């Protein structure tokens, strides 16, 4: 099943087209974001491949910002991560990536954790701030506040 989503960014002035392909054994995501930050136009295209448990196996991000073009490639092998082909032990144990330009990456732990109503969990994620050119490990807390959300 394929879902095609179009949304407008709130925090960053942007427009995103996200295509999600759900199958029995995997989830695939292809998305493109165009926006304006500090009076400069940026473009981000990302592809994320997940297993059926919503664990990231692969993430590639192509960016164009301030006349710089950059490609970042993450690979995960049982919670051990490589970035552009180099192993990064500081990301060991992370299951999710978070790209703050898109709300979609917040759905990764939401779908993976399957929290009960009133339950909360703190996790470590790889936080990819493309506009500030910063990649780091951060803690995030996810809470299920009701049966609907």
Image (cartoon, rainbow, N blue to C red):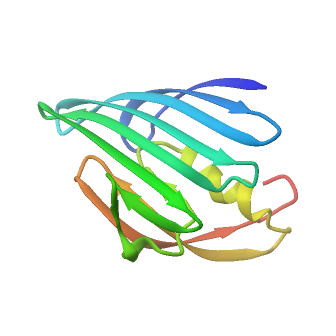
- Outermost residue on the left side: it is 67
- Write the residue at 77% across / 65% down: 145
Between residue 114 and residue 118, name the one nearer to us. Answer: 114
Q: Residue at x 38, y 76 (%)?
A: 90
| Quadrant position of the N terminus in the picture | top right
Say above or below: 141 vs 133. below
Side of 42 where 105 appears, left or right: right
Q: Quadrant of the C terminus?
A: bottom right
Which residue corresponds to the image point at 37% horizontal and 47% vertical from the top-left? 73
Locate residue 75, reporting x and y percent. 47, 54
Image vertical order of residue 130 relative to residue 86, above or below: above
User: Which residue occupies 37% across, 55% down?
Assistant: 128
Q: Position of residue 118 (x, y in %)?
A: 81, 73
Give the image location of residue 25, x and y in percent: 78, 42
Which residue is nearer to you in this view: 101 or 136? Answer: 136
Measured from the top left, where is residue 66 in percent x and y?
13, 34
Q: Is residue 134 left or right of residue 142?
A: left
Q: Is residue 60 left or right of residue 57?
A: left
Q: How many marks?
A: 0
Q: Residue 44's image quarter?
A: top left
């Amino acid at each position: 099943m394929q879902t095609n989503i179009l949304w407008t960014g709130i925090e960053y002035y942007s427009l995103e087209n996200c295509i999600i392909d759900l199958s029995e054994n995997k989830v695939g995501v292809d998305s493109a974001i165009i926006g304006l930050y500090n009076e400069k136009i940026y473009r981000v295209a990302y592809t994320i491949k997940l297993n059926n448990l919503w664990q990231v196996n692969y993430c590639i991000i192509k960016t164009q910002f301030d006349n710089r073009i950059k490609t970042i490639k993450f690979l995960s092998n049982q919670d051990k991560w490589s970035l552009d082909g180099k192993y990064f032990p500081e990301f060991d144990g992370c299951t999710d990536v978070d790209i703050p330009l898109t709300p979609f990456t917040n759905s990764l732990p939401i779908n993976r954790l399957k929290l009960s109503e009133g339950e909360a969990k703190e996790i470590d994620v790889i936080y990819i701030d493309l506009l500030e050119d910063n990649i780091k490990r951060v803690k995030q807390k996810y809470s299920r506040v009701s049966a609907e959300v």
